[in-house]
Image (spheres, rainbow, N blue to C red):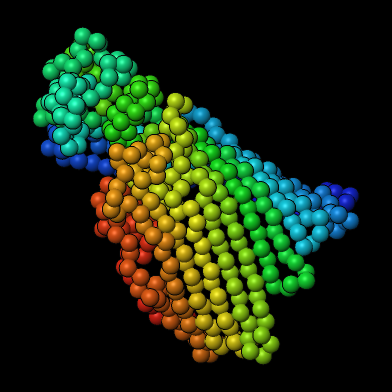
């Protein structure tokens, strides 16, 4: 329900427009079901389920022009909004809000700023991932890092030579942080069968993630250059308790790198007495495993700049040309896994937990020519994707960029330029034809070694970021009856 309260006299004495208000309410229901046969349950445990989630929300938004068309204040306006949400899957009630301000000293220049709190509750699927308990074996041939593991180390008595040792990978301090007694440190009884310890996925309570966003920007629309609009905005986003999936290595690697940080080491749940990380899945054990599954992280961070511009150039009887530009400069993309860990900035990097695959700079520039009669138009689009570098070669230890991990091949993806072309013919008032060629020059996607181990990367490239299929041709038509 929306309304203009100016009709009832609720208007600022310095403004022409009245206060506008919007009220809303919503109910929705999400469902998720799964079943498995007896053989699967015998091997993996768990149970069939049929889940649903009910959501009730209500909101209010108010737009209040304070000053209009006055000296040094062409427009001063504030906007506020508030939403309250209740999810049947969580006993808490959540609220979000926004506060925005717009100030235009003259019609050519507008400053704007906003402060927002937003929340996203876990979906039914994420709730199931977080709460449902399933068991598996640790991938590869890995074992408890506190158990004796044969490995090569430098021989202290003979520099330049190596010897074989069976000492644990982790230190006594790290193992103690996982709840292991000092007497069992390095004990062969900690070895899991077939060198594969138990992994328990689930058993968490997933809370909503909360984002706080700040934006500051300006819009320039010069009266002396008709048809031009330019804007630039700075954004700063911090997501507390961000939702995501953590595999077992998230806890084991994190526990080692942090020298015993409880945030990570609490994910290693040892059997009382024996300390072993192995348990039979069918028994639904409460200990003897490494945790995995959907849960809340510490926080995520995103910062950067957005640029937009549009310009229309009239050509008289020859038609017109429109330019539309959108560019994004990412200065920070990452987060912090625990209070004791450094912040990870993955802008421009991939691998080692940098799964967002965000280049520092990307843009799109579209040029469209239209004849004066509107019968024909052609649009040429330039898409630019900035370079990406392996996190191993970043030089930043926070994302794994240590000298011993630096690669010499396949560690950088060069910037990529794509060009698209579209032709439109208005054959008649009721029929138009479109010819489209995306990736006109058939640009080959960049090769990414070991891509299956990198988030969103498959088939030796990153289809979420690059055109994996080459040139794409399409023919379309619009018919009005």
Where residue 481 appears, x then y in whole percent? 50, 83
Count of number-bearing discs:
0
Above/below status of 381 relative to 293: below
Above/below status of 294 relative to 19: above
Residue closest to the eye, 40 or 351: 351
Above/below status of 268 relative to 328: above
Where residue 298 appears, x then y in whole percent? 45, 31
Q: Is residue 317 left or right of residue 354?
A: right
Q: Is residue 439 left or right of residue 97?
A: left
Query: Is residue 57 visible in the rendered structure shown here?
Result: no
Where residue 349 appears, x then y in whole percent? 40, 48
Considering every residue shown, the one lying at the far left of the view is 194
Query: Is residue 169 visible in the rendered structure shown here?
Result: yes
Give the residue displayed 51% in from the left and 78% down from the top.
379
Snapshot quadrant of residue 420: bottom left
Give the residue displayed 47% in from the left and 35% down from the top.
343
Above/below status of 406 relative to 371: above
Q: Is residue 118 left or right of residue 197?
A: right
Where residue 465 appears, x then y in whole percent? 39, 58
Residue closest to the eye, 126 or 6: 126
Give the residue displayed 16% in from the left and 24% down from the top.
158
Snapshot quadrant of residue 401: top left
Give the residue displayed 58% in from the left and 69% down from the top.
324
Residue closest to the eye, 34 or 422: 422
């Amino acid at each position: 329900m929306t309304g203009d309260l100016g009709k009832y006299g609720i208007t600022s004495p310095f403004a022409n427009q009245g206060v506008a208000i919007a009220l809303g309410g919503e109910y929705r229901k999400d469902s998720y079901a799964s079943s498995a046969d007896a053989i699967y349950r015998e091997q993996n445990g768990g149970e069939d389920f049929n889940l649903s989630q009910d959501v009730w929300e209500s909101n209010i938004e108010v737009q209040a022009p304070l000053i209009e068309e006055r000296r040094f204040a062409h427009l001063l306006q504030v906007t506020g909004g508030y939403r309250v949400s209740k999810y049947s899957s969580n006993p808490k009630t959540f609220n979000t809000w926004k506060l925005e301000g717009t100030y235009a000293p003259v019609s050519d220049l507008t400053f704007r700023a906003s402060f927002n709190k937003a929340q996203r509750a876990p979906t039914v699927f994420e709730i199931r991932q977080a709460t449902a308990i399933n068991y598996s074996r640790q991938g590869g041939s890995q074992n408890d890092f506190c158990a004796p593991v044969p490995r090569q180390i430098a021989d202290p008595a003979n520099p330049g030579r190596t010897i074989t040792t069976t000492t644990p990978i982790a230190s006594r301090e790290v193992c103690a942080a996982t709840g292991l007694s000092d007497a069992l440190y390095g004990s062969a009884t900690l070895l899991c069968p077939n060198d594969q310890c138990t992994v328990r996925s689930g058993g968490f309570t997933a809370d909503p993630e909360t984002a706080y966003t700040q934006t500051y920007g300006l819009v320039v629309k010069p009266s002396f250059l008709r048809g031009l609009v330019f804007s630039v905005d700075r954004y700063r986003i911090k997501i507390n308790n961000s939702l995501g999936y953590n595999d077992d290595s998230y806890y084991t690697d994190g526990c080692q790198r942090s020298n015993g940080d409880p945030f990570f080491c609490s994910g290693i749940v040892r059997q009382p007495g024996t300390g072993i990380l192995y348990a039979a899945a069918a028994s639904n054990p409460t200990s003897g495993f490494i945790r995995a599954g959907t849960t809340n992280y510490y926080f995520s961070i995103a910062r950067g700049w957005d640029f937009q511009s549009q310009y229309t150039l009239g050509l008289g009887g020859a038609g017109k040309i429109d330019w539309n530009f959108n560019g994004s400069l990412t200065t920070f993309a990452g987060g912090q896994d625990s209070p004791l860990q450094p912040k990870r900035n993955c802008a421009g990097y991939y691998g080692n937990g940098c799964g967002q695959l965000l280049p520092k700079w990307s843009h799109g520039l579209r040029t469209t020519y239209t004849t004066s009669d509107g019968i024909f138009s052609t649009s040429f689009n330039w898409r630019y994707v900035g370079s990406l570098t392996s996190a191993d070669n970043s030089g930043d230890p926070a994302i794994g960029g240590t000298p011993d991990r630096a690669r010499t091949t396949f560690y950088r993806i060069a910037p990529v330029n794509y060009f698209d072309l579209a032709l439109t013919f208005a054959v008649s008032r009721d029929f138009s034809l479109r010819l489209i060629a995306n990736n006109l020059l058939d640009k080959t996607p960049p090769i990414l070694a070991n891509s299956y181990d990198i988030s969103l990367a498959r088939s030796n490239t990153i289809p979420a970021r690059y055109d994996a299929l080459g040139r794409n041709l399409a023919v379309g038509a619009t018919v009005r009856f």
